[in-house]
Every structure is written in structure tokens, then in C-alpha cells.
Image: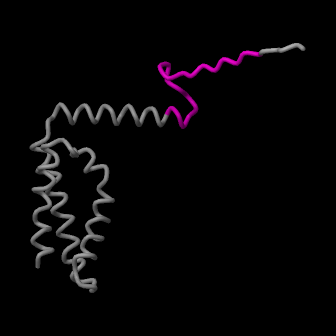
Amino acid sequence: ILAFAFAFQTPLLMVLLTKFGVINTVQMKVYRKWAFLGCFLLASVLTPPDIITQVLLGFPLYGLYEFGVIISTWFEDPKQRELILRRMEAEKQARKNAKQGKTSPKTKNKVVVKKVVIEE
């Protein structure tokens, strides 16, 4: 019963972490599949070893996670969210360019090799 009581504190914890800037909703949305896995791993640890109670805690816990994401968007700074989205888009473009073998003009690396001949 305590596991179910702690599970209902998940949205509150997520809102507090968002308000203090530890996490943001963009990160929460990107890592949804890991949250789903984490919810069921937590449910398997907190419940007795039968599958029914694990599912009875896992699905509501994940539902509360999604509810926490929705509520956290209300408390998140929109400017911060836009900044994070722009940074993620730039990183995505950089990965795409690196995959194609291109480099951006700002990050071109020049290698200069000097040949030194020593005569004896």
C-alpha cells in the first residue's frame, strides 16, 4: 500500500524538479521509453513477485508520469523551453552533418604538418 501512496507523489516530484530547473519537459518527452521501463522496474521492486500487482502499479505509475509531464509544462519557463529546443535542433543538425562527412565552417580543424629534416 505504501508503494501506491508513493506512486501518486510522482507528478508533484516532477513539477518540483521542473520548477527548480533540474529537468525540463523536453527531456521528459525524449526519455519516455526509459521512463516506461523505469516505472515497471520500480513496480517490480516495490510489489510482491506476482505479475498482476506489478501491472497494477506499473501502468498507473506511467500514467502519472505522463500527467506529470503535462502539469510540468504549465510551470516551465517558455523561454527556457525554446532555448532547449533550438539547442537540440542544432545538435541534431550537427550529428546529421557529421554522419554525412561534413563539418560546419565554425568547427573546421586544420592540421598543419611541418617537415623537419635534420642532417648530420
Is residue 7 depicted above or below 75 in this figure? below
Q: Quadrant of residue 57?
A: bottom left
Name the spot of residue 87 as percent of width and height, x first.
33, 32
- For image coordinates 12% across by 49% down, the residue present is 16
Q: Position of residue 47 (x, y in %)?
A: 22, 80
Viewer-proximal residue, 96 or 24?
24
Say if the magenta span includes residue 105: yes
The residue positioned 21% from the left and 36% from the top of the image is 81
Q: Main secondary structure of the magenta part?
A: loop
Reply above or below: 28 against 37. above
Examine the rendered structure and indicate whether residue 88 appears above or below residue 17.
above
Q: Is residue 104 or residue 9 the one in the foreground? A: 9
Which residue is depicted at the point 53% across and 26% down?
103
Q: Name the outermost residue toward the bottom.
A: 50
Look at the image and give the residue range highlighted in magenta: 97-115
Does 101 lie within the magenta span? yes
**Which residue sits furthest right?**
120
Give whichever of 118, 100 is nearer the camera.
118
Q: Residue 65: image x %, image y %?
A: 19, 59
Q: Is residue 101 above or below residue 64?
A: above
Q: Quadrant of the N terminus?
A: bottom left
In the rendered image, the quadrant that contains the C terminus is top right
Q: Quadrant of residue 34?
A: bottom left
